[in-house]
Image: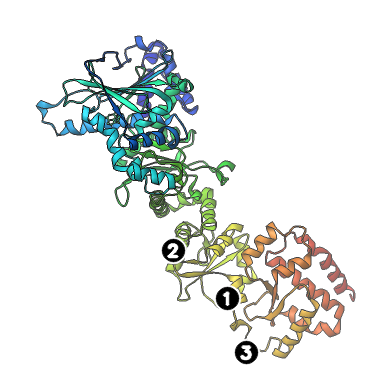
Amino acid sequence: MSTFTRLVSVACKRTVLKNGRNASNRVRNLYLLKNGGALNQVRFQHTDAEKTEDYHSIIKNTEKPLGESTKHEFQAETRMLLDIVARSLYSEKEVFIRELISNASDALEKFRYISMSESEGDKINRPLEIHISTDKNARIFTIQDTGIGMTRDELVQNLGIIAKSGSKAFIEQIKQQQTGAENIIGQFGVGFYSAFMVADKVEVYTRSSLDDHGWKWTSDGTGSYEIQPAEGVSFGTKIVLHLKGDSREFADDETIKNIITKYSNFVGSPIYLNGKKANIVQPLWLKDPKSVTKQEHMEFYKFISGSYDLPRYTLHYKTDVPLSIAALLYFPEGKPGLFEMSRETESGVALYTKKVLIKNRTDNILPKWLRFVKGVVDSEDIPLNLSRELLQNSNLIRKLRDVLTGRVTKFLLDQLKKDQGEYEKFYQDYGIFIKEGIITNHNQTEKEDAAKLLLFESSRLEAGKKITLTDYIKGATESRTILYLAAPSRTLAESSPYFESLKNKPQEVLFCYEPYDELVLMQLQQFQGYRLISVEKDMRDDKAASDLTNLGEDSLKRSEINELSNWLKEKLVGKVASVNATTRLENHPCVVTVEEMAAARHFIRTQSHGLPEDRRYAILQPQLEINPKHPIIKKLYKLRSGDPELAELLANQLFANSMVGAGLVEDPRVLLTSMNDLLSKALEKH
Ligand code: FE6
């Protein structure tokens, strides 16, 4: 049973036993889960919580101050630090709860650690717990832990030390919003100051096992604090906040419950709110990856994605180098919707440090194109109170992102190797994100990393079989190029004049069937030192193919070609930029090439609407490549003197056909008028 089900079923046990409707309760729990508040709504079933057997609280009014109280002034540095934390470090007040819970959790972990090293006999056995209570009428928020507590010295020092050791540097860094503030703001205790965001008076009762009694500390957070011995103080620390009028919401049980679920759901010790268990203790991502069941992943995925979708792939890994990271990332089973497609969509990954939430939907810990990945990243190296600026722009976050991106790419490649069929389904649904990643990235290494994930059909393989760029270069010749050809389908690719132009070149060609594919490869420019070249470009740049010294019997002669070329240039003025003969064609009379075919086609698809024809040609600068062996071309040569009118119609038609063949005509209907004129003329004499 997963931690989640366990929790829900514990919470529901009484009800289930009473009415015996186990199945319907499951359905209800799932419904509640969908609405984001299962844990919290289940609680409605116990309005009389205090009377039920699972009520448990340690917060009691047993503390009594004793003897003399001493008054202390805050040091200047402490006061400055307190001011910054209480006034401007956080944009939301509610985070004071996360900070106090985090301190309590640290105090419990320290106690756990110390008692572990003690011999059996001396072991102090006490439950390690965090308790929170709220009192709406008195406007009081209380948090108590059973952790190591503080001695008098520590009580005085824990505030002072931070201030002394780092506040000047800290303040400087905050002012300049530099990276590096990570060191200081992550320290134990600074978060305590955040209590003064919401409280105008704070009481702290604390007792360390080194002391035979406890201490009371109070302050209004302005200039001074008082310390007094106290009796009736439990081991650990209790902090009582007298809330300001505008912070009365934090004395509301429901509000606090939601904040705990949001930030501290996976803290390592149980949190009780007004006597009721309020968190899930075991965070899945810190467990041994091998021990987590599929069922647990499914439920956790539902929790974080707030959906009924399932994980398609699960990447769960831990590492300590170069950063300490525990990551649990899911790739959705469902196809992306318009929402996921939008570049505005936030990341689906939450950032934690030691089980405490830093930020849900943290941008920048994965590149934008991986925004469909959902899950959790927990890194001990990231300080809790990472400011907004630091989250956006710090070396630490950048490093984290690099490590994670590398790991995600490697993971997907492993999936490809493991089961190409499954990967192809994933690629079908999410390949568009990978392509976006290549097009939008400016860093060549990152581009090439994403490009490893691309798949293409190839001229060497049968239809339907796909390979990666890495596979391609393994079988590549010494030319150090990768050839690709864009066409709407396999059939059109193989019958294309451009493909034909490779007949004497045995090099493998990748086929791009999606309009984006060729743009992606054009943008990529090179992969592992291999230049990416479209077949059209290869043809246009091929000087050897226009060498007309050895033309053979069935071809127009060199002088005839020159004559025809000049005539064509004249008749097609304003359309073609140049005319060239090529030996690379066989069954096609001519083709058109442009400098960057992918960009040209993209231009025609997206920006050419309503543009006059002559403007299009001026931008595209088409080059007409004629096949001097082709019957139509040879006929045209003769027709120029025999029937100049028909010859001109034919020339125009050949050019128009070539533009269609190049994929540079949006709507082939534009051909029909000139085609019919040509046919009428050709049939006149019959
Ligand atoms: C932060 C209050 C000074 C422990 N437990 C808890 N909080 C702790 C410590 N802090 N430092 C140690 C802190 C306060 C004052 C420091 Br006054 F919460 N819960 Cl052991």
Whether 353 is drawn above or below 655: the answer is above
Where is the C terminus found, in terms of image quarters?
Answer: bottom right
Q: Quadrant of residue 119?
A: top left
**Dot 3 corresponds to which residue?**
550
Q: Residue at x 67, y 89 (%)?
A: 553
Q: Could you say where residue 441 lies in the image, as x and y percent from the top left?
A: 51, 57
* Label 1, residues with CA under 10 Å away: few <14, some 14-19, many ≥20: few
Q: Amino acid at mark 3?
A: Asn
Q: Could you say where residue 449 lies in the image, as x and y percent from the top left?
A: 44, 58
**Dot 1 corresponds to which residue?**
503
- Left or right side of 290 for 253: right
Q: Quadrant of ligand 1?
A: top left
* Label 3, residues with CA under 10 Å away: few <14, some 14-19, many ≥20: few
Q: Is residue 273 visible?
A: yes
CB within 8 Å, label 3 to label 2? no
User: Looking at the image, is mark 2 or mark 1 nearer the viewer?
Assistant: 2
CB within 8 Å, label 3 to label 1? no
Whether 626 is drawn above or below 252: the answer is below
Indicate if the residue with disc 1 has its beta carbon within 8 Å of ligand 1: no
Indicate if the residue with disc 3 has its beta carbon within 8 Å of ligand 1: no
Inter-mark Cα distance, 3 to 2 = 38 Å
Q: Quadrant of residue 204?
A: top left
Q: Is residue 1 visible?
A: no
**Dot 2 corresponds to which residue?**
470
Q: Could you say where residue 112 lies in the image, as x and y percent from the top left?
A: 21, 31
Lower sequence index among marks 3 and 2: 2
Q: Amino acid at mark 1?
A: Lys
